[in-house]
Image: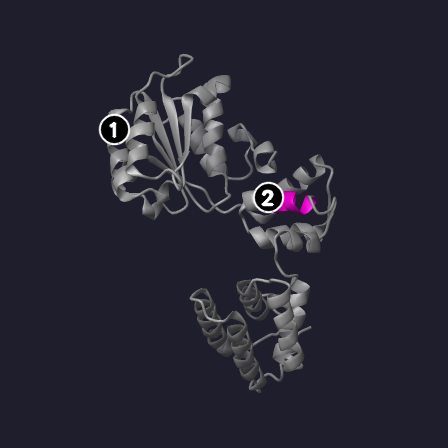
C-alpha cells in the first residue's frame, strides 16, 4: 500500500499545520457550502476534502462521495453525465446532501467549468462541490463567487520533517538527519512527494542516507555536483568538463538539476563563494538563459559548459574583493 494513503489523516484534527484552513472548515460543519481549496501541491487540500467526507458521513462516506481527478476527467461530457447523475441522486444513510470532490479542478476546460457552474446552482439542495486547485486564477470567476475559498499555505520545514520521521519509525526504517534534509530538498513543502520519496528509498535500503534518497529520486548527489562545479569554475576546466560529461551522459543526471544546483551553490545565502552583489544579476541572467535553451531542446552539455565557462570568466575578473574561493 502506498504510504501516502496508508498514513493519510482521516480527521481534520489529525492534519499537520494549516491551522487557519482547518479551523475555517471545522466551523462550517455540518452544513458546508461549496468549497474551493487552493494552494501549492502536497499541502493537504485533498486530505482536508476527504477528512470532511469522513466527518460528515462516517462509515457511509464512500456511498455519498464522488471523487474525480479533473486532470483526467475534465471534459464537458464528464460534467454533464457523470457529475450531474451523481449530484441529483438521493443521498444515502439519511445524509442531507452528497459530496462531489473534483481534484485538480484548475485543469478543467472552460466549457466544463461553465457547465459545472450551472450544476452547482441547480443541484445545491442535493449536492455540495469541493473543488481543489493549485492555481485559483484558472478557476472562472462565476465558480469562485459560488464557493467559500480557502487557501492552503506551504508546509513549514519542521512539520514535514517531523511527519517523515514518524512514518519512518512506524515502518521500521532508520533515517538520519542528512537524509531528512535531502528529502526536504528534493520535495520542498510537498509532503506527498516527500512521503513517496521516502517509500522509494526504503525499497533500496532500510538504513536510509542522503545518498539513498538521491539515488531513489534519480538525482545526482549534491556533493558530486559541488565538486564538479567548483572544478569548472575555479580549477581544471578540462577535468571538470569530463566529469560533467560522465555525470550527464553516462549516469543520466538531469541537466536542469545541474543548473538548479549551480544557482543554489553560487547565489544562495549559504553560498561559500561570497560573490559581490554587482555580479549576481549577471549570473542569474546567464543561468535563466541556459535553462530556457535546454528546455527548448538545445544540447544540454554544450549549454552547461557554455554557462559555466561564462561564469568562470566573470568570477576570474573579480578584483574588488579578491579571488572567490569555495570552501
256 is higher (above) or lower (below) than 79: below
List x then y, in percent, for residue 48. 48, 33
List x then y, in percent, for residue 193. 56, 46
Task: Residue 27: give its label.
Answer: none
User: Looking at the image, which residue is at 28% across and 31% down?
Assistant: 80
Task: Residue 196: give its label.
Answer: 2
Q: Magenta residues, as a range?
A: 194-202
Disc 1: CA contacts within 10 A as few (<14), some (14-19) or many (>=20) = few
The image quarter containing residue 113 is: top left
**Distance Cα–Cα, label 1 vs label 2:** 38 Å
Q: Which residue, given by chain and number where applicable, does mark 1 sit on? A: 121
Relative to 111, 237 lies left or right: right
The image quarter containing residue 2 is: top right
List x then y, in percent, for residue 245. 61, 72
Q: Is there a contact, CB below 8 Å, between mark 1 and mark 2?
A: no
Q: Earlier in the sequence, mark 1 or mark 2?
A: 1
Q: Main secondary structure of the magenta part?
A: helix
Relative to 276, 292 lies left or right: left
Asked whether residue 108 is drawn in magenta, I would say no
Amino acid at each position: 500500500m502506498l504510504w501516502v494513503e496508508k498514513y493519510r489523516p482521516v480527521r481534520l484534527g489529525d492534519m499537520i499545520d494549516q491551522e487557519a484552513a482547518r479551523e475555517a472548515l471545522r466551523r462550517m460543519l455540518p452544513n458546508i457550502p461549496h468549497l474551493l481549496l487552493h494552494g501549492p501541491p502536497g499541502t493537504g487540500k485533498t486530505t482536508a476534502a476527504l477528512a470532511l467526507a469522513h466527518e460528515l458521513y462516517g462509515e457511509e462516506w464512500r456511498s455519498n462521495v464522488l471523487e474525480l481527478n479533473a486532470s483526467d476527467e475534465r471534459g464537458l461530457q464528464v460534467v454533464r453525465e457523470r457529475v450531474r447523475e451523481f449530484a441529483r441522486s438521493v443521498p444515502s444513510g439519511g445524509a442531507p446532501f452528497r459530496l462531489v470532490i473534483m481534484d485538480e479542478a484548475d485543469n478543467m476546460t472552460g466549457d466544463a467549468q461553465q457547465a459545472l457552474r450551472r450544476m452547482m446552482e441547480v443541484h445545491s439542495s442535493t449536492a455540495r462541490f469541493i473543488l481543489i486547485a493549485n492555481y485559483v486564477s484558472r478557476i472562472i470567476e462565476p465558480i469562485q463567487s459560488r464557493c467559500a475559498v480557502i487557501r492552503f499555505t506551504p508546509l513549514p520545514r519542521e512539520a514535514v520533517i517531523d511527519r517523515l520521521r514518524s512514518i519512518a519509525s512506524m515502518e521500521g526504517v532508520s533515517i538520519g538527519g542528512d537524509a531528512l534534509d535531502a528529502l526536504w530538498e528534493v520535495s520542498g513543502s510537498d509532503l506527498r512527494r516527500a512521503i513517496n520519496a521516502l517509500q522509494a528509498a526504503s525499497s533500496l535500503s532500510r538504513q536510509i542516507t542522503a545518498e539513498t534518497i538521491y539515488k531513489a529520486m534519480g538525482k545526482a548527489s549534491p556533493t558530486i555536483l559541488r565538486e564538479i562545479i567548483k572544478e569548472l569554475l575555479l580549477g581544471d576546466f578540462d577535468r571538470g568538463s569530463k566529469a560533467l560529461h560522465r555525470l550527464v551522459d553516462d549516469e543520466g543526471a538531469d541537466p536542469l538539476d545541474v543548473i538548479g544546483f549551480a544557482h543554489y551553490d553560487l547565489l544562495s545565502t549559504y553560498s561559500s563563494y561570497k560573490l559581490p552583489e554587482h555580479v549576481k544579476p549577471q549570473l542569474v541572467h546567464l543561468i535563466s538563459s541556459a535553462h530556457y535553451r535546454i528546455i527548448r531542446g538545445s544540447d544540454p552539455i554544450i549549454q552547461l559548459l557554455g554557462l559555466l565557462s561564462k561564469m568562470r570568466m566573470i568570477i576570474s575578473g573579480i578584483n574588488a574583493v579578491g579571488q572567490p574561493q569555495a570552501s
